[in-house]
Amino acid sequence: MIRTDLAKRYDWVYAFFCALLMLILHGYQFNTSDQAEHLPQVYKLIDPQLYTRDFFVNAATQHFGIRFFYIYMVYGLSFIMPVWLICFVGTIICNVAAVYAIIRIARMIDPAQFLLPLLAPLLLIVVFCKWTIGGNHFDGNMFLCSNLAVAFAFGALLHFFKKNYLLISFLCGIAVLFQLLIGLQLFLLLFAVLL
């Protein structure tokens, strides 16, 4: 029991190290790329006077859309910290959670193997980071709705190996709220495996 708890603690430390390594290797991005679609909607909620003549932002903020939960989560958190800090901390948390799940899955696959839990997250953040898988890729250098979904999806995958099927459904459901394809594809794949 003590050895397992110690391994879990070291796994969290190693996951944090890998998350920082990913940011060092790939850089951190804010207010650019896909966030240029996400964050203006948050800024509009914070200050309704912004983007008064912008067609996209006005249309996206007037209706329920696919970014609704992400936008309102960041907006809600903006009452206690600035958006740039929310995005940076969110990036770290999502990457640490995803890498931790990968490490734990690697330990479950082969508990006697020492190198597998160390190499699996490194392969993800160095080699496979920008490879597209099912329309999405692991892009952990900015805080997007897909990063949240990936963190929940890796958690669901971890609990698949633990045979905790109710938690798998719950985590995939939360992933769907942030990125429909990531959560739904994983849920359908895991459901098909169980059949």
Image (cartoon, rainbow, N blue to C red):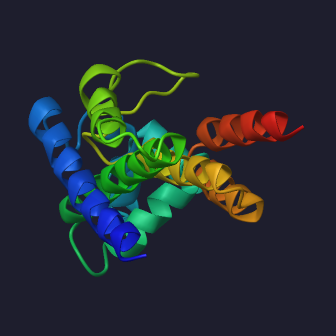
Residue 155 lies, with reference to residue 139, above or below; the image says below
Q: Residue at position x 24%, y 26% from top?
A: 126
Which part of the image, by quadrant, shows the C terminus?
top right
Q: Whole-percent x and y of residue 156?
A: 61, 52
- Please identify the residue farthest to the left as the structure is shown: 24
Q: Residue at position x 53%, y 54% from top?
A: 155
Q: In front: 34, or 16? A: 16
Q: In front: 3, or 69? A: 3
Can residue 47 be seen? no
- Please identify the residue farthest to the right as the structure is shown: 195
Which part of the image, by quadrant, shows the N terminus?
bottom left
Query: Which image quadrant for residue 44?
Result: bottom left
Q: Residue at position x 23%, y 47% from top?
A: 19
How many marks overall? 0
Q: Whole-percent x and y of residue 85?
A: 19, 64
- Please identify the residue farthest to the front as the structure is shown: 112
129 left or right, relative to 21: right
Q: Whole-percent x and y of residue 15?
A: 27, 53
154 left or right, relative to 45: right
Q: Whole-percent x and y of residue 68?
A: 56, 56
Q: In front: 63, or 184? A: 184
Can residue 69 be seen? yes
Q: In front: 50, or 159? A: 159
Query: Which image quadrant for residue 119?
Result: top left
Q: Residue at position x 76%, y 58% from top?
A: 165
Residue 110 lies, with reference to residue 96, above or below; the image says above
